[in-house]
Amino acid sequence: MPVILEHLGKRFGDGAPVLDDVNANINQGEFVALLGASGCGKSTLLNIIAGLEAPTSGALEVPSDGAAFMFQDAALFPWLTARENIELALKLRGVGKAERRIKAQELLELVHLGTAGDKRPHELSGGMRQRVSLARSLAQDRQLLLMDEPFAALDAITRDLLHDELERIWKETGRTIVFVTHNVREAVRLGQRVLLLSSRPGRVVQEWAVTEEHRTDAGLAGQLTGVITARLREEIRRHAK
Amino acid sequence: MPSNPSPLAEVTETREHVHAALTRTSTGKEDLRELESGLDSLQSDADRKHRIDWSRILLPVAALVVMVLIWQFYVSLGVKRRDLVPGPLDVVAQMGVLWSDGKFQQSIWTSLQRGVVGFLISVAIATPVGLLLAQVAPLRRAFGPLISGLQVLPSVAWVPAAIIWFGLTDATVYFVVFMGAIPSIINGLISGVDQIPPQYRRVGTVLGASRLQMALQVILPAALPGYLSGLKQGWAFSWRSLMAAEIIAVGGTIGFGLGSLLDQGRVLSDMTIVMAAILLILGVGILIEPAGLRAHRKATPAPPRPPGRQHPLTRPVQSQTHRKSPTAAVGLLPLPAANA
Ligand SMILES: Nc1ncnc2c1ncn2[C@@H]1O[C@H](COP(=O)(O)OP(=O)(O)OP(=O)(O)O)[C@@H](O)[C@H]1O
Ligand SMILES: [Mg+2]
């Protein structure tokens, strides 16, 4: 099991705990959507899994080679072309020069950007930048891929397409993906499992399985979306004064 | 698992491919590729051709011609004595005389050479100092205000001190150039490093960069726009300081530069020489500037569009990226008059 979280807690300074007693297991090759209201600690949890931050209590088990990470804004380096951005990830991994070229082109083609490799990020649309960013995180070649609201800043049309794209790539590459979002539809659309994180403190309060039927049956998917939304609102209402 | 009666039950009966955001919206890999490439071409405007915009060149040239014509017209009215207000033709004739004297070439060569050498030495001094200040917080707290302050001080104010210390030698001229250029280059570099979005460092970390790799592959290129605009401004300040020093400090072993030519015109009360020198100083400044600007444009990436929502961890610092870009800051700096 690539990721095991046990009684994980996190507080910043002496503030109230942001995360408290988070328990979750994520299986090899699984696509897990981590859902929660704004500010509930989703990014914090993801950063802890990525090793960018340390938990204040509890224990976690993550793959020894770390995780690939994809940010909300593509966070591509503007002085490099799309291809060079991907090649940089390969280079920092120690891949040789000749192999970098080949591998980068493969990855560009995987995200359907085979001909846009020589463009700078500012010449690309938001959706294209996110696909380059996805290719870059795949270039890291880690089994575990963490995604922090990667499509939140995109328009709805592009986002719908990237959902299909991400699902396809996930199936082709067999990665384990933890996908953070505050969008219930997105969680249902993508996750095999949706984990709901409560707010203040953040804790996994409920989880739902999403089956293949939900992928093709809008009625079923809509129903599940409704159920999850209701539960999420219940969580939010708890904080009303 | 959900068990409520579905409010969308009727919808399920008309099953089609497209079900909004809830389900798969494309029908396969080929369909997806086609949709994406359609969207890509709709959303990116990269295919716009970069044609030369002639109006950008022709209009300023026309404006210049009009100015010269007005000048000539005014002179031909004969309101003022011709030796006090020479016309454009008189000035051009004077340039011809200076050229055949060899003063034209000599003064340009002397000034240009000093300007460039002084500027390059300033770069060599300012770059490591700037990097040090950018990286070491206490040093920066201590010296930052001082260096920003120095930028406001017109470097011509150093001329008397320099003459007392170094006499009428090249050292005086160089000293004044350094005092003009070094602070602005340091400031440019510091603001370049400051403006690096914190996200870039995080990406570097996630990609597994070592400290050295982080410095060379991330920090340095990311700070380049600010550094280059500092260099550009540094050159402008070098040139202005140089002229000021040459006008004030004349004689001794100080060679004959454009500033000296200007001062000679004043001493001889020859307005044609004065005007010729001013035009030459301007001309050299204009010719050197675009060279720097081109390099600057090429290396400067477009400022990243601010993301719709920001990463909470970086929120407090990231607001910095919304400050004026270094390029914009240069436009707002004190005008030449403040320095020379
Ligand atoms: N470095 C930090 N220092 C102090 N508090 C922090 C820090 N990082 C996050 N927090 C706080 O922790 C809480 C959770 O933040 P986090 O970024 O994990 O939320 P999130 O669920 O990702 O929110 P969003 O949906 O806005 O991205 C917030 O209240 C935030 O203010
Ligand atoms: Mg977040």
Image (cartoon, coloured by chain):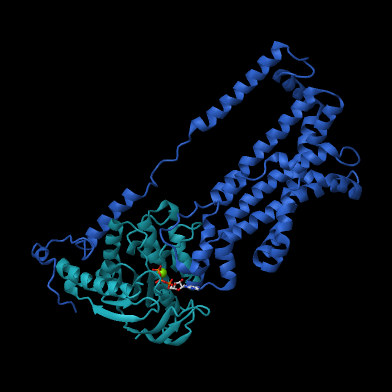
Chain colours: A cyan, B blue
Task: Give percent across and percent down for residue B200.
Answer: 51, 64
Q: Position of residue B135 (x, y in %)?
A: 65, 66
> A111 and B250: which one is in front?
B250
Which quadrant of the structure image shows residue A141? bottom left
Tell me the quadrant of the picture where the C terminus of chain B can be found: top right
Total labels: the figure holds 0
Residue B90 image offset from top left, x and y in percent: 74, 18
In depth, the one of B339 and A127 nearer the eye is B339
> Residue drawn 34% across and 69% down?
A181
Up-down: is B113 above or below A125? Answer: above
For the residue pair A30 and B336, the one nearer the viewer reads as: B336
Q: Is residue A1 left or right of residue A120?
A: left
In x, y percent, where is residue A226?
21, 70
Quarter location, residue B124: bottom right
Task: Give left or right: position of A98 versus B293.
Answer: left
**Going by the image, does B314 lie left or right of A223?**
right
User: Is residue B123 among the parts visible in the rendering?
Assistant: no
Image quadrant of ligand 2? Answer: bottom left
Residue in the image at 21% along x and 73% along y = A227
Residue placed furthest toward the front: A241
Q: Is residue B322 left or right of residue B32?
A: right
In the picture shown, does residue B287 fall above or below A91?
above
Q: Quadrant of residue B30?
A: bottom left
- The answer to whether residue A99 is above or below residue A63 is above
* Residue nearer the viewer, B187 or A166: B187
Whether residue B138 appears in this view of the structure is yes
